[in-house]
Amino acid sequence: MKYLLLLLALLLLASSPAGAQALRPAARPDSLTMPLASAPAASDTVAALHRLFAAKRKNNKRSLAGTAGVAAIGGVVLGTAPPGFIISEQAGLGIAIIAFVSFPAFVVEAVMAMEYNKKNEQRAIDSYQAHQLSRHLTRQLKARYFR
């Protein structure tokens, strides 16, 4: 009985009309109705370079926000330290957070921002089109950027 109901349900589904996409009528190549290509499509590698640089810029913004948060924590720790002639341990901790964690991270992020800016992206695309893409960028182009 179970198989009979399953068979009936399958036959019912098979007999229903199916929706499909309608095909466009093919136009002759010399026809005026044939769509013209407005511009040549960018190659996969150029699109991957765009994605690589955009991803690096996006990650840089995220890490910049995190570093600003760490610097703010250091500022709060430093600001809530009790006033006094001798630097307290709490003030020393705030200074250490700002000087040894936040400042070097800001420097690294500034270098990354300069390396992956729009100007360098255009240079990389131009060098790719001249078949001279640097090994550094070639190694960074992973499969995820070609999707």
Image (cartoon, helix red, strand yellow):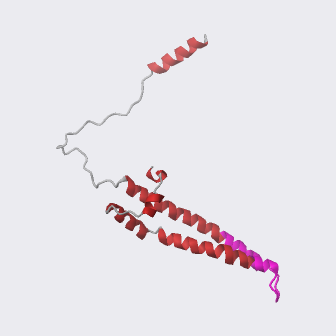
Task: Using the rendered view, name the quadrant where residue 5 is placed.
Answer: top right
At 45% from the left and 63% from the top, the residue drawn is 136
Would residue 105 appear left or right of 34 to someone viewing this image?
right
Q: Residue furthest left?
A: 30
Question: Residue 22: where, in percent of width, then height?
Answer: 34, 33
87 inside magenta stretch: yes
At 68% from the left and 70% from the top, the residue drawn is 70
Q: What is the span of residues highlighted in magenta in the rendered image? A: 69-93
How would you classify the magenta stretch by its main secondary structure?
helix
Would residue 18 appear left or right of 22 to someone viewing this image?
right
In this rendered view, identify the residue nearer to me: 74 or 127: 127
Question: Residue 55: where, in percent of width, then height?
Answer: 50, 60
In this rendered view, identify the residue nearer to me: 134 or 83: 134
At 53% from the left and 14% from the top, the residue drawn is 7
Q: Is residue 80 visible?
A: no
Relative height, residue 117 to residue 38 (above, below): below
Task: Using the rendered view, name the quadrant where residue 130 is placed.
Answer: bottom left
Which image quarter holds the N terminus? top right
Q: Residue furthest bottom?
A: 85
Relative height, residue 57 to residue 104 (above, below): above
Would residue 22 appear left or right of 68 to someone viewing this image?
left
Relative height, residue 79 to residue 117 (above, below): below
Q: Residue furthest front?
A: 135
131 inside magenta stretch: no
Question: Residue 103: where, in percent of width, then height?
Answer: 63, 76
Q: Is residue 69 visible?
A: yes
